[in-house]
Amino acid sequence: MNVFYLPDATEGMVSFSEEESKHCVKVLRMQEGDRFCVTDGKGSLYDGELAEAHPKRAVACLSNRRPGYDNRTFTLEIAIAPTKLNERTEWFLEKATEIGIDKVQLFASYHSERRAANVERFRKVMIAAMKQSIKSRLPEIEDVVDFNKLVKQPFDGQKFIAWIDDNVTDQLCDKYEKGKNALVLIGPEGDFSPEEAKLAMDNGFIPVSLGEARLRTETAAVVACHTIQLLNQMKRT
């Protein structure tokens, strides 16, 4: 089923943005009477029927507002240093959105190779992934902040730093408590410096391992995201 994003969705007659209208009418060649799904990115899905197939201002009738299957009782945030190649960060954002995430915070640290990001481009990647996976919630994404500032920000939940060090033997899957909000720090391709790791721990972050393999930044972030989601989906024994 085709899915469209309308942040101001409501039951009744609505107008699509020019971008979504073009995709609906020009790309997908949908006609009046065709049906589809609409997500507002805020937790709700709608049934839609195309009422006016205008390539710049399509009009639809929305009905059957319902909560999305991806509404959760916990929040998951990943803070990640943008990779040198934007394509790798975009791959993480796409997969994390499909798996389920609430917020992505970009940061710059000592070994960062990229200290600026095209957040609007990244947000479009996440919107496309939300629609593809029929999610009702669009994750937040925040522009790059300094690592020292990031670790001092308040967070209501468990805080972890994925750090490659011989002394770090605790696994994320063992330290995370099911149902709690989680924030996981994922370092750049050169990892965190010892000083940064200490600063994070001094501010309440628990050092954890994601396994024995050395993972790329974007892979480590996906593993952390999937681990938290999987633990929350598992039934108690």
Image (cartoon, grey):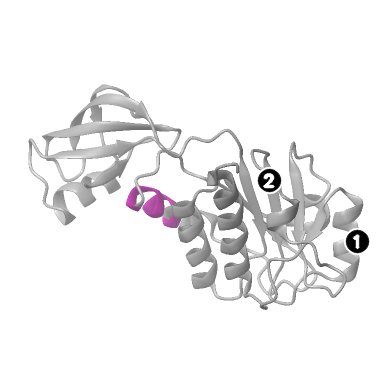
Q: Which residue sits at x=23%, y=32%?
A: 47
Extreme top residue here? 12
- Residue range (magenta): 125-132
Mark number, residue 1: none
Q: Residue furthest front?
A: 237
Q: Are marks 2 and 1 in contact (CB under 8 Å)?
A: no
**Classed neighbour count for the residue bearing mark 1: other residues with Cα under 10 Å, few (<14), some (14–19), many (≥20):** some
- The residue at the point 76 percent across, 54 percent down is 160
For residue 128, side relative to residue 185 (left or right): left
The image position of residue 152, as x and y in percent, is 84, 47
**Vertical relation: 110 (above or below) 73:** below
Q: Quadrant of the C terminus?
A: top right
Quadrant position of residue 109: bottom right
The residue carrying mark 1 is: 198
Question: Residue 113, percent across and down?
Answer: 68, 75
Q: Give the residue displayed 84% in from the left and 71% down from the top.
A: 193
For disc 2, the marked residue is 182
Q: Nearer the viewer, residue 60 or 97?
A: 97
Q: Position of residue 57 (x, y in %)?
A: 21, 38
Which kind of residue does numbered mark 1 sit on? Lys
From the viewer's perspective, tell me whether residue 92 is left or right of residue 53: right
In magenta stretch: residue 131: yes
Q: Earlier in the sequence, mark 2 or mark 1?
A: 2
Front residue of 13/180: it is 180
Task: Decide whether the magenta segment is chiefly helix, strand or loop.
Answer: helix
